[in-house]
Image: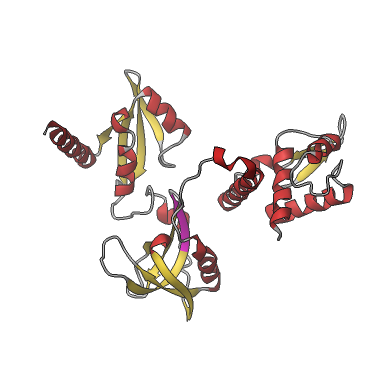
Amino acid sequence: MAAHQVNIYFWLIDTIASGRLTREDINRRWAHCRYNDNHEDEFPERKFHRYKEEIQEIFDVEIRCTRNNGNYYYIDNKDDISGGFTRKWLLNAMAVHSMMDQAQDINDSILYEDIPEGAQYLSLIVDAIKQRNQLRFTYHSFNRQEQYELTLAPYCLKVFKQRWYVAGCPSTHPNEIRVYALDRVQDMRPTTESFEYPKNFSAKQFFAPYYGVFRNQEPTKVIIEATPQSAQFLRLLPLHESQKEVKHFHGNTFFEYFIAPTLDFIQELRTHGTDIRVREPETLVQIFREEAQKAYEMYCQ
């Protein structure tokens, strides 16, 4: 599929998703679209309906037309676009790509984050999961000075804070699921060795009690107290799907989670500074007490 064609798909989706539009409205916008290479005054009728059908087939996004009080085009399943995580991620990623393509002449006004390497292995891993074939690669863990070779039966992929991870069973520990960062991988290649994908495995359930990718703690009830400003932020962007408000006291809000207090989660709590206070469990409270004491002593020197 040509990139130019994909850009037109997303231009149509974004344009019609903005509100109910007539063909005249769409034509006016198309006349000024950067993807209108032929400088057409209107979006050709046959081309419009062909693209409309292809958008539904490829992205499961249906563009419909109402016959009441005029012919207005709209996204029929607009609310469903965000329903499937894979489709939502694909739509967002390709929409951002389309936006970047349109904004080439103002690149100096758009700032991006550096993304670690590893995405080049995604296609290979997806194919290995589908074909049930193991992968062989070199891995350099932060915890080991030397690189080492391993063979992995891949079960799923996960992206966390712009880093990609693959989870699966290494041949050295066939009954233990481990997680590997793709930016620490080198020379990944497919093998002819097959593996049996566990029937009861669910990637969502596997990571559900955790924030991030570390799984070296057992999930437990965690309660934090947040200032009004921090509480508003947490309502907008919950730390975890188990988050719920359980109490309000002197203007502050208490949030409860069922989550493993792993390093990923602790680091996220640290980013909120004194705007949040850990209340339970006591073991997690003690960690923050000790860190606060060390910070105090360090800055008193």
Q: Position of residue 133 (x, y in %)?
A: 49, 75
Q: Residue lying furthest left in this view?
A: 301
Residue 152, image quadrant: bottom left
For the image, the number of numbered tags is: 0
Asked if residue 201 lies left or right of residue 16, the reply is left
Q: Nearer the viewer, residue 4 or 289?
A: 4
Q: Nearer the viewer, residue 196 or 271?
A: 271
Q: Nearer the viewer, residue 147 or 278?
A: 147
Residue 158 belongs to the span the image colors magenta? yes
> Can I make out residue 202 in this image?
no
State the predominant SS element of the stretch in magenta.
Answer: strand
Asked if residue 188 lies left or right of residue 56, the reply is left
> Can I make out residue 267 in this image?
yes
Q: Position of residue 273 (x, y in %)?
A: 30, 32
Quarter that holds the C terminus: top left
Residue found at x 32% / y 28%: 275
Residue found at x 56% / y 37%: 109
Q: Position of residue 167 (x, y in %)?
A: 42, 63
- Residue stretch rendered in magenta on the structure: 156-160
Q: Position of residue 193 (x, y in %)?
A: 46, 80
Quarter that holds the N terminus: bottom right
Q: Is residue 58 above or below residue 17?
A: below
Q: Is residue 250 above or below residue 173?
A: above
